[in-house]
Image: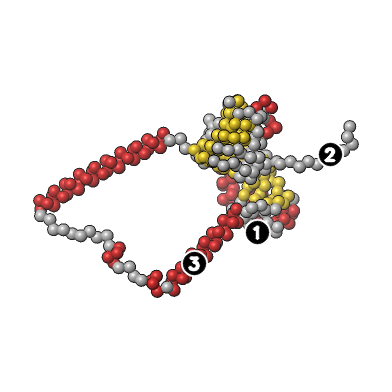
Amino acid sequence: MSNNAFSLKSQMIPLTVIELTTLDNAIFDQQLTEKVQASPALFDRMPAILGLEAFETADESAIQKLLFTIRKHNILPVAIKGAEPLKELAQRLDLAWIPPGRNKLQKKAQQAKEGIEAVNETSASASEDPLSQEAIPDTAISAEPQQLELTEAESSTTTLLQEQNTNAVEAHHSSEESNRSDAAALTVKAKIVATPVRSGQQIYAKGSDLIVLAQVGQGAEVIADGNIHIYGTLRGRAIAGASGNSEARIFCQSLQAELISIAGVYQVSDDLPADRIGQSSQIELKENHLHIDTL
């Protein structure tokens, strides 16, 4: 028997990052409430990281309010992810600190800032250019039709033809709209992803099915309000029926998932039946339990 009381191991454990774009607690609370109500079991005592990569610094009282809101929904914050100045804040709040990775939000903000500056420069340049101030002739924007003199008989005939043409156009448009409505009713919406979903990525098909034509890697997350079809190996997290659709299903060619969930009912990798791991599988919800069948 070993005398060692413990051993240290490195593991890749998926954690949800709550990536903030605002520090307004009222807005955050409202939107988080909607998410939790849609899938309560998924969020129950779920460990999470508070993502603050969009902020160089943050007011401690504002972060405390956000953490209180998170805990109020039975979510367990374990760390803050953000810039170096936030490290001391995390320590004071008794949370771990994780340095930022590739910050897409900051990149977008910088691109937006550069775009605004470019527009401002263009506007300033245009105001200095006398050619840009050239007036547009009235004739260039006039939409008044030319008036023709018609006899009384010609005017009556023209009016009748216009009415007939108007009725015909309206009938044609009504028919087209009806056909489009029928076609839309018959169309099954789906979001298609043709490339592998890699660690750290999240794909969400809102109001539709999700079809992934490649593998879903460890640490990746695919979410759909409808069904999820994965034509490859599922190693990450798959969440179907995210808006509460208990009829949704998950299909994959090889089941090695970190987590599967339908309408808030979930299983993690340790709960998966051993004889289903690596198999082509279909997951559905029956009597509030996930059933996994081989395909």
Dot label at residue 139: none
Residue located at (60% from left, 25% from top): 294
Q: Earlier in the sequence, mark 2 or mark 3?
A: 2
* Location of residue 67 with respect to 216 vertically, above or below: below
> How crowded is the residue under tag 1: few (<14 C-alpha within 10 Å), some, or many (20+)?
few
Q: Earlier in the sequence, mark 1 or mark 2?
A: 2
The image quadrant where one finds the C terminus is top right
Question: Disc 3 marks which residue?
Answer: 120
Query: Would residue 294 be visible to someone looking at this image?
Result: yes
Q: Position of residue 153 (x, y in %)?
A: 10, 51
Judge by depth and name the residue closer to the eye, 202 or 94: 202
Separation of disc 1 and disc 2 at Cα?
Answer: 38 Å
Question: Disc 2 marks which residue?
Answer: 6
Separation of disc 2 and disc 3 at Cα?
Answer: 62 Å
Residue located at (68% from left, 51% from top): 81
> How crowded is the residue under tag 3: few (<14 C-alpha within 10 Å), some, or many (20+)?
few
Residue located at (70% from left, 48% from top): 79
Separation of disc 1 and disc 3 at Cα?
Answer: 26 Å
Residue located at (70% from left, 32% from top): 270
Question: Disc 1 marks which residue?
Answer: 56
Query: Would residue 225 be visible to someone looking at this image?
Result: no
* Location of residue 125 with respect to 291 vertically, above or below: below
Judge by depth and name the residue closer to the eye, 247 or 119: 119
Q: Position of residue 250 (x, y in %)?
A: 57, 32
> How crowded is the residue under tag 2: few (<14 C-alpha within 10 Å), some, or many (20+)?
few
Q: Are marks 2 and 3 in contact (CB under 8 Å)?
A: no
The image quadrant where one finds the N terminus is top right
Three-letter amino acid code of the residue under disc 1: Glu
Q: Are marks 1 and 3 in contact (CB under 8 Å)?
A: no
Q: Earlier in the sequence, mark 1 or mark 3?
A: 1
